[in-house]
Image: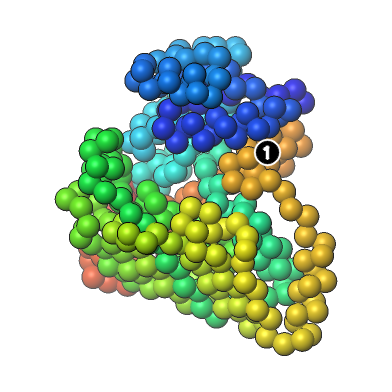
């Protein structure tokens, strides 16, 4: 399979996508950057040696030299752009959050079937070697059942952060706040290891900046496997950390606290006894590290298209996290504990 020809839309976080594609020249050929801001797009193109800049997303749809369109655009634009790309016969990659409602996600799934093209949401954190090693042990049933998990996402976002991009911090354009736009990665990591949520009780508050959406969150959750967990999120922490801690019958696993790379090594894995330690050591000797981060996700995407296998991140993965976030928002608004899954009659099915 020859390299896939990719166009990236959005010169913000899209610059990190561009670097990742350029690190995978046997799999991807970056043909263009699209952004409505000519000055910003031109600067990024010069800095990263992108050979072409366009300013209208629609110009990409008719191009025969584009196989994949990678959306790094504001969330409120995603559905229309995904729909247009699929109908134009393009594979689509989309930054988080994928969409703003479960109804849109389900419509998108139908479009994928109709178009026979693929959509891959971005959850690049799940490919860090630390988290991958824990997944390796879980898949081989060496952890025993899960008891509890504890997650902290304590980041900093100044008021200037919101002024810099006027669509940020607004319900109508960002669709949600700290949980949807920042901590959604941490949520995906939980479900990637332990499976989906069953019951949620939560508070969300806006305490740090004068914005429309939440910047502080506290969640208590029961998962489908019976394990219990807490998730704490704030965008008001000068000292920034991300931390995941999983307690199983046979081991406890704890991440490093680097705010934007805590899925990478080092992780601390503490076995309950010598027998478990021996089994874990032997199993990890067979662990074969692959690429991490965006490179890890994009490389696996290429392989999935080549081999016809499942995408490394699926629409169902994104739906699971969005459903959970919808339940969190409903719990806060109603003051009730919320059971999952959310049916089509639930008020959050049609909008978070």
Q: Compare residues 345 and 85 and report the one nearer the observer.
A: 85
Q: Quadrant of residue 327?
A: bottom left
User: In the picture provided, is 225 more to the left or to the right than 211?
Assistant: right
Q: Compare residues 1 and 150 and report the one nearer the observer.
A: 150
In what quadrant of the picture does the N terminus appear? Answer: top right
Q: Residue at x 20, y 48 (%)?
A: 211
The answer to whether residue 319 is visible is yes
Q: Residue at x 37, y 57 (%)?
A: 155
Q: Residue at x 49, y 19 (%)?
A: 46
Where does the image place residue 199, in percent across and percent down from the top left?
41, 71
| Local crowd size for mark 1, using a 10 Å CA cut-off: few (<14), some (14–19), many (≥20) | many
Where does the image place residue 83, in percent across and percent down from the top left?
45, 28
Q: Compare residues 218 and 15 and report the one nearer the observer.
A: 15
Where does the image place residue 57, in percent across and percent down from the top left?
42, 19
Q: Which residue is at the far bottom?
A: 273
Residue located beneath label 1 in the image: 299
Q: Quadrant of residue 38?
A: top left
Q: Is residue 305 above or below residue 89?
A: below
């Amino acid at each position: 399979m020859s390299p896939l020809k990719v166009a990236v839309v959005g010169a913000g976080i899209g610059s990190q996508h561009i670097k990742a594609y350029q690190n995978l020249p046997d799999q991807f050929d970056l043909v263009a950057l699209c952004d409505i801001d000519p000055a910003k797009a031109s600067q990024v193109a010069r800095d990263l040696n992108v050979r072409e800049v366009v300013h209208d997303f629609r110009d990409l749809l008719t191009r025969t030299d584009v196989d994949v369109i990678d959306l790094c655009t504001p969330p409120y634009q995603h559905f229309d752009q995904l729909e247009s790309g699929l109908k134009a016969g393009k594979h689509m990659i989309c930054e988080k959050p994928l969409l703003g409602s479960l109804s849109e996600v389900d419509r998108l799934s139908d479009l994928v079937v109709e178009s026979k093209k693929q959509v891959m949401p971005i959850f690049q954190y799940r490919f860090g070697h630390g988290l991958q090693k824990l997944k390796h042990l879980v898949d081989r049933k060496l952890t025993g059942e899960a008891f509890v998990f504890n997650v902290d996402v304590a980041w900093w976002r100044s008021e200037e952060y919101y002024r810099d991009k006027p669509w940020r911090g607004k319900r109508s354009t960002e669709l949600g706040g700290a949980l949807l736009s920042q901590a959604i990665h941490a949520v995906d990591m939980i479900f990637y290891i332990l499976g989906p949520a069953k019951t949620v009780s939560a508070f969300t508050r806006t305490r740090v900046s004068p914005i429309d959406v939440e910047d502080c969150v506290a969640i208590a959750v029961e998962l489908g496997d019976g394990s219990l967990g807490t998730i704490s999120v704030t965008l008001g922490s000068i000292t920034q950390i991300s931390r995941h801690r999983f307690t199983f019958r046979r081991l406890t696993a704890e991440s490093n606290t680097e705010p934007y790379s805590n899925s990478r090594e080092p992780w601390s894995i503490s076995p309950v006894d010598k027998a478990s330690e021996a089994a874990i050591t032997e199993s990890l000797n067979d662990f074969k590290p692959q690429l991490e981060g965006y490179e890890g996700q994009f490389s696996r995407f290429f392989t999935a298209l080549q081999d016809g296998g499942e995408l490394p991140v699926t629409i169902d993965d994104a739906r699971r996290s969005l459903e959970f976030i919808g339940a969190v928002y409903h719990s806060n608004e109603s003051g009730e504990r919320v059971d999952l899954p959310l049916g089509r009659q639930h008020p959050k099915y049609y909008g978070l």
